[in-house]
Image (cartoon, rainbow, N blue to C red):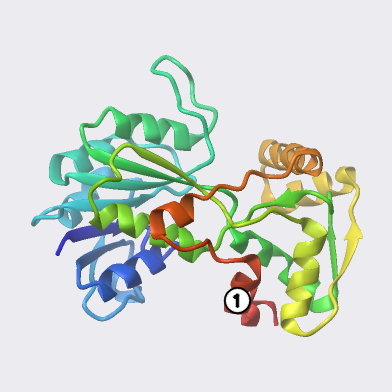
Amino acid sequence: MTKILVIGANGSVGRHVVASLTEGGHEVRALVRNAAEAALPVGVEAVEGDLAAPESLAAGLSGGVQAVYLMWPGIPVQPRVVELIAEHAERVVYLSTDVPDLADDEPPVIFHQEIERLIRRSGLAWTFVRAIDFAGNVLGWAGQVREGLVRWPYGQARRSLIHERDIADVAVRALIEDGHEGAKYLVTGPESIAHADLARIIGEELGTEVRWAELAPETAREQLTAAWGNAAFVESRLRAWESFTREPERVTATVEQVLGRPARTFRSWVRDHAEDFR
C-alpha cells in the first residue's frame, strides 16, 4: 500500500480523495491548518501545515510519503512547496483547471499554469487533473432555488459541470496506479446542459418548481463583482458563459477512459446535494 499526503484534505474534492484512499487500505496523511479541528476518517493522520509557509510541510512529507495530492487555493504561488514535495515524494497529482500548457518563457495567465510548470520541471512523476467547472459551483444558487426562481445571465450557456467525486476518483487512480505519469486529464461531466435546464433539473430532483429569470449581463457584472470582489474574474466568467451560448463547454470521455465507467450525471450530483438546497 502507498503512503500518501493529501494537501487540501478538507476541500470538496480532497475529502473524497481521503475517504477513497482510506477505504482502499492506503496510509493517508492529511495536511490541515488545525489538527484538533480536522474532521477526518478514522485512521487518517492529521499533520499541521500551511502552503503559505512552505517549510511547515516538512513534517507531513517526512517518513516515507511516496505520493502527494496537491490542491492549491487562490494564494500566491510558493515554488518551495513543489521543491519540498520533490525532495521527499516520487509522485504528485495536481488538481488543476482547463488551461493550456505554459512555455518556459511565457508569463502565466492563471496560477494553475505556474504550478504546472514548476511541477513539470521538478523531476517528479506527475499527473494533472484538469477539472472543468465543478457542479458544486451551482450551490451559489441555493438561496434562489429556495425561492423558486434563479436569476442568472446566459440561460442558454451549455455547461459540462463535473461531480467532485469523479474528480477525486480520477485523482486517486493516478495516485495509486502506474501508467498515469505525464497525463493531463481534462475531466468533465458526461453532457453539456444549459444554465436554465440546470435550474429546472434541480427543481425536478427536489420535487419543486424552479423557474429561470434571465439576468442582463450588465446587472450580473455589477452584482457578481460586489459578491466576489474580483472584477477581472467576473469579466472572464461572463465572457466564457456568453461563448457557451454559441459553442457548448467541452465534453470529454476522460472519466470513463480512466475509471472504466461513465461520469456521474448532473442529476446524480443534485441528489447527492439535495439537502444543501433545502
Find the residue positioned furthest to the bottom. 207
* Residue 202: image location, x then y, percent: 73, 73
Q: Residue at x 77, y 85 (%)?
A: 207
Residue 17 position (above or below residue 85): below
Q: Which residue is under mark 1?
A: 273
Side (left or right) of 136 relative to 116? right
- In this picture, is 271 found above or below 223? below
The N terminus, quarter of image = bottom left
Query: What percent of the width, then of the height, locates residue 131?
Result: 51, 49
Q: Would residue 145 appear left or right of 91 to someone viewing this image?
A: right
Q: Nearer the viewer, residue 242 or 109?
A: 242
Q: Residues within 10 Å of mark 1 (few under 14, many from 20)?
A: some
Query: Dividing the picture into quarters, in which one does residue 2 lie?
Result: bottom left
Instruction: Look at the numbered disc 1 and give the secondary structure of its residue.
Output: loop
Q: Residue at x 46, y 27 (%)?
A: 101
Residue furthest left as drawn? 63
* Residue occupying image coordinates x 63% and y 43%: 250
Residue located 17% across and 50% down the image? 58
Q: Residue furthest top?
A: 105
In the image, 114: left or right of 253?
left
* Residue situated in front as seen by the camera: 173 or 223: 173
Which corner quadrant holds the C terminus?
Answer: bottom right
Q: Is residue 12 visible?
A: no
Which of 101/179 is in front? 179
Residue 108 locus on image (x, y percent) = 49, 26
Q: Does residue 272 show up? A: yes
Image quarter of residue 29: bottom left
Q: Amino acid at mark 1?
A: His
x%, y% of residue 276?
63, 77
Q: Describe residue 250's horizontal placement relative to residue 212 as left or right.
A: left
